Amino acid sequence: MAVPSNAVTNLGIGTAGGLREDLEDVIWDLFPEETYCLTNLDKVTAKATYHEWVKDDLASAGANISIEGDDHSGAAYTAPTRLGNYVQTARKDWTVSGLANETSKAGRKSESARIAMKRLRELKNDIEYALVRNQASSAGGAGTGRASAGMESWIATNEILSTTSAGATTVGFSSGVVAAPTDGTTTAAFSETILKNTLNAAWSAGGDASTIMLETTQKAVLDGFSGVATKYNEVKGAQQATLIGALDVYVSDVGNHTVVLHRHVRANVVLAIDPSFWSIAMIRRPQFINIAKTGDSEKRLALADFTLVSRNEKASAKAVALT
């Protein structure tokens, strides 16, 4: 078979000859948002770039046998501890020309409105990243921004090593700042024993590590643990459906634990947190700011000032140096 002579085909017409485009009027977004902490933790107000709070601990329980009528001894008293974290500013900028907002485009009416939505989501992702990572706190300077220490850096008391030779260390809060933890030089596989030790450490210190946060590498391992609940009647009333990001429930000797698959937790770490002992302090909550117009364009930014408040890091725990 052959095409008849002088037959008109699409190949001959082409776009120059007037063929219209067939472009779907929709944009298929891939927006992997992961804001479990930003969404679920308490929010408080900060009023300075260094936000402080006070924590206290009970003395360890022990034998308490007193002599009847014994005189007052004036036992030593340990004062509460003052803690703090620096407020970090996160921002996303964009500029759109006046003409770009007026021309016809696929999948959106306003270029500025679409970019604003996208930048705000990116900003929230960046805040979540800072909340859970191993970032140190910093006062910043003339040429550097202030930094808020993340959860992984705060949790120092209950650090469970994957192996005794791991060599990982976390200083935590000291002299007004929180240092970044040191990763272990020797690693080992995540196991149910390590998870139980992590959860037990938080419980023994007085916490309730009801939320386990981990990345896909360790989540795949946890899925094989015997304590993963497979039926709703196994979780004793835990309302999984109301928890944003909740995927599974792990049942241990010390309670029920929501398992959150988290994109920003490092693959070599598993965090077991008591959410009631964490909050986010903000001076300016996520918002849009219009920048002065200097030409035929619209300038805007999305901005937030935040810091992570670790009310008492002993209530949480972490497993580190995992493969």
Image: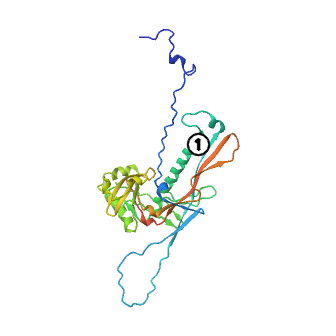
Dot 1: element: helix
Note whether residue 44 is visible. yes
Residue drawn where x is 51% and y is 13% of the image: 8
Query: Residue 34: where, in percent of width, then height?
Result: 46, 50
The relative height of residue 107 versus residue 243 in the rendered view (above or below) is above
The relative height of residue 178 versus residue 20 in the rendered view (above or below) is below
Q: Is residue 83 left or right of residue 221?
A: right
Q: Is residue 189 left or right of residue 174?
A: left
The relative height of residue 276 versus residue 217 in the rendered view (above or below) is below
Q: Quadrant of the N terminus?
A: top left
- The amino acid on which the numbered mark 1 sits, given as a three-letter code, is Ala
Indicate the quadrant where residue 95 lies.
Answer: top right
Residue drawn where x is 60% and y is 33% of the image: 104
Residue drawn where x is 50% and y is 65% of the image: 173
Note whether residue 268 is visible. no
Q: Which residue is mark 1?
A: 113
